[in-house]
Amino acid sequence: MSNALGAAGELAIRSLVERAPLASSLAQAFKSKGFTLALVGGPVRDAILG
């Protein structure tokens, strides 16, 4: 594992990126400006679970 997220966190991120690729684009846009994007709540859960 590349960070402190653990296996479950890594799986959740991969699933979210596959199901909602815009999330990855938004995160990169925030990162390029020095910010961190936090996606939380029901919509994120729904995107991961399908």
Image (cartoon, rainbow, N blue to C red):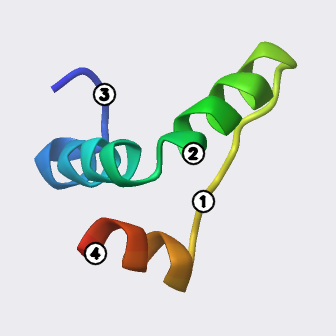
The quarter of the picture where residue 48 lies is: bottom left
Q: Residue type at mark 1? A: Leu
Q: Of the numbered discs in the image, which one, if any, rests on residue 39?
A: 1
* Element type where label 1 sits in the image: loop
The residue lying at 24 percent from left, 21 percent from top is 2
The residue lying at 54 percent from left, 77 percent from top is 43
The quarter of the picture where residue 23 lies is: top right
- Which residue position is annotated with label 2? 23
Q: Earlier in the sequence, mark 2 or mark 4?
A: 2
Tell me residue 19's x, y (percent). 35, 54
Relative to 41, say whether 27 is above or below.
Answer: above
**Residues under numbered marks 3 and 2 in contact, where contact means CB atoms less than 8 Å apart:** no
Q: Earlier in the sequence, mark 4 or mark 1?
A: 1
Q: Earlier in the sequence, mark 3 or mark 2?
A: 3
**Residues under numbered marks 1 and 2 in contact, where contact means CB atoms less than 8 Å apart:** yes
Q: Residue furthest top?
A: 32
Q: Of discs 3 and 1, which sits in the foreground? A: 1
Tell me residue 29's x, y (percent). 76, 25
Q: Residue type at mark 2? A: Ala
**Mark 1 residue crowding within 10 angstroms, few (<14) / some (14–19) / many (20+):** few
Q: Of discs 1 and 2, which sits in the foreground? A: 2
Marks 3/4: CA distance? 25 Å
Marks 4/1: CA distance? 16 Å
Q: Quadrant of the C terminus?
A: bottom left
Tell me residue 37's x, y (percent). 69, 44
Q: Earlier in the sequence, mark 3 or mark 4?
A: 3
- Which residue position is annotated with label 4? 50
The residue lying at 64 percent from left, 53 percent from top is 38
**Mark 3 residue crowding within 10 angstroms, few (<14) / some (14–19) / many (20+):** few
- Left/right of residue 38 with respect to residue 1 in the rendered view: right
